[in-house]
Amino acid sequence: MEEKKLRIDKQFKSCPACHYKEQFFEELSKEAIEAGSLNKRVYLIANKQGLTNPASFKLIPIGTKFPAYDIKVDVCPNCGCIYAVRLATGEAEKRMQLLDNQPKLILPHEFNDNGGRPDGIRP
Ligand SMILES: [Zn+2]
């Protein structure tokens, strides 16, 4: 039987309500980067996360893979609409971190922040 997985990697470059192309935090970020007070773009919300149950995470074997997502949200400066500018699914893996020897959930390299299509993502 074929396994069904939600696979999304989309970017939304204009407001879904008024089609305005500028984004509030993107414009603010450009100004701050030019002024030297910021080194990368910020979002209203930027969240990359593997979907696991924190209570049982310690019991799960190293190497276990989890569904994961990446969402970035900005605001339209024209009409105030809050919308996702990046929406992607992927996979995270529980790995041992060498520094403190504690298991961590490692998000995949497939979530990059440069807006390009990530490596290794399966459509
Ligand atoms: Zn708008």
Image (cartoon, rainbow, N blue to C red):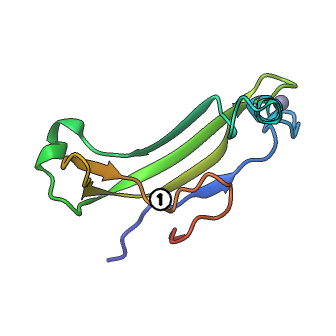
**Residue appearing at x 15%, y 52% in the figure:** 60
* Left-right relation of 74 to 67: right
* Residue 14 vertical placement versus 106 (above, below): above
* Left-right relation of 119 to 81: left
* Residue 87 vertical placement versus 22 (above, below): below
Q: Nearer the viewer, residue 67 or 105?
A: 105
Q: Name the quarter where the N terminus is drawn.
A: bottom left
What element does badge 1 sit on?
Answer: loop
Q: Quadrant of ligand 1?
A: top right
**Residue appearing at x 19%, y 46% in the figure:** 102
**Residue appearing at x 70%, y 33% in the figure:** 38
How far from the left and from the top, in percent, is residue 94?
Answer: 26, 55
Q: Residue furthest left?
A: 59
- Which residue bears the numbered disc 1? 6
Q: Name the quarter where the C terminus is drawn.
A: bottom right
Q: Residue furthest top?
A: 80
* Residue 77 vertical placement versus 18 (above, below): above
Is the residue marked 1 within 8 Å of ligand 1, measured from its CB? no
* Left-right relation of 84 to 1: right
How far from the left and from the top, in percent, is residue 31?
Answer: 83, 30
Amino acid marked by disc 1? Leu
**Residue appearing at x 65%, y 55% in the figure:** 10
Q: Residue furthest bottom?
A: 1
How far from the left and from the top, in percent, is residue 62?
Answer: 19, 59
Instruction: Report the label total.
Output: 1
| Disc 1 packing (10 Å; few <14; some 14–19; many ≥20) | few
How far from the left and from the top, in percent, is residue 63?
Answer: 23, 63
* Residue 119 vertical placement versus 57 (above, below): below
Please identify the quarter of the rendering in which residue 22 is found. Answer: top right
